[in-house]
Structures are given as structure tokens and as C-alpha cells.
Image (cartoon, rainbow, N blue to C red):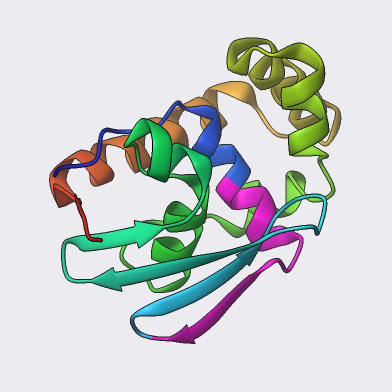
Amino acid sequence: MYLKNPPRIKVLEALGAIADGRVKVINENECEVISSEGDRIYKVVVRGDFVNSDDNGTVYRNYVGYPIIACLMLLKKLSFNEKFSSVLRGIPWRKLNEEYKSYERVEEIVFEIARERNVNRGELENFIKVILDELRRLHLRKTQ
């Protein structure tokens, strides 16, 4: 089964997870990603174009979840931008998602935080587009 591209905010969430030091590369095929509240550890497996993670987006919605994106960035299979990542440090992703129940609304809040931290929205939007294009080209398939 091919995985769908994720909601745009998942690219930002992946960058934030890296900045927060919540992504651990185990080896060239595995990562562990700690959730933003620290109460879950997602296992990510990457073998060529076959990937899997036990996050909700990957398991239940069949899209590339943020733990996979973060892992692929650290494994240098997707582009990474240190500046954008560091700007997204410390964002309470789960809390925001549960409070607003709208990825679009949370994305606006995150763009506002980035603006306050001196990052241009257009640049960040372009980076999201780059990652989504790269994901499309990878044609990632879900393993069991």
C-alpha cells in the first residue's frame, strides 16, 4: 500500500521534533521518535521505499506521519533546514492539535510563532512544498 502525502503541518511537526531532540537514529533503517508530550515513543522503520511507523497518521490514515518525515530528514533521504527546525523548537504540538482540532488553525499559529522568531512565512511555505514534492517522488509504501 502506498502512503499518501501528509497534511502540510506534519512537515513542520517533524522539524520541531528534530529541534527538540526527540528523534533518535538507531541505525540506517530505524529511528525512535518521542511524542511532543513525551508520553509515547514511535518506532520508525525505513527499508528503501518501504516505511512504517506506529503513529496515528501512518497507522489509521495511511499518510506519511511526522515521525517518518523526521527520520527521513536525519537519514538524509529528505531535505533538512536547520534554521527552520530550530525556529520550531518547543511547540506543544499535541496540545495545540487537541485544543483547536484543525491542522489549518494550528498551522497559522505555528507560522505566527515562526514570524515572531524572524522566519519569513514564504520561505517556510516553500520548504514545506519542497518536502511534499520529495515525498511524492519517493513513492513510499507501508510495510506491516
Q: Describe residue 130's horizontal placement relative to residue 47 as left or right.
A: right
Asked whether residue 80 appears in the rendered view, the answer is no
Q: Which of the image's four quarters has the N terminus?
A: top left
Q: Is residue 39 left or right of residue 144?
A: right
- Total numbered badges shown on the rendered structure: 0
Residue extending farthest to the bottom is 27
Foreground of the two, 92 or 53: 53
Q: Which residues are magenta?
A: 14-27
Question: In the displayed structure, would residue 114 be above or below residue 90?
Answer: above
Taking the spot 45% from the left edge, 44% from the top edge, the residue there is: 65
- Name the spot of residue 77 as percent of width and height, x first: 30, 65
Q: Position of residue 38 (x, y in %)?
A: 81, 59
Q: Which quadrant of the figure contains the C terminus?
A: bottom left
Q: Position of residue 26 (x, y in %)?
A: 50, 86
Q: Could you tell me if residue 57 is visible in this image?
A: yes
Q: Which residue is at a point 51% across and 41% down the rendered structure image?
A: 56
Q: Is residue 87 magenta?
A: no
Asked whether 21 falls inside the magenta stretch, the response is yes
Query: Looking at the image, which residue is at 60% across and 12% down?
Result: 104
Q: Nearer the viewer, residue 82 or 58?
A: 58
Is 82 placed above or below 122 here?
Answer: below
Task: State the image coordinates of residue 139 (x, y, percent, origin top left).
Answer: 14, 47
Q: Is residue 122 depicted above or below 105 in this figure?
A: below
Is 92 above or below relative to 96? Answer: below
23 sits left or right of 76 in the view: right
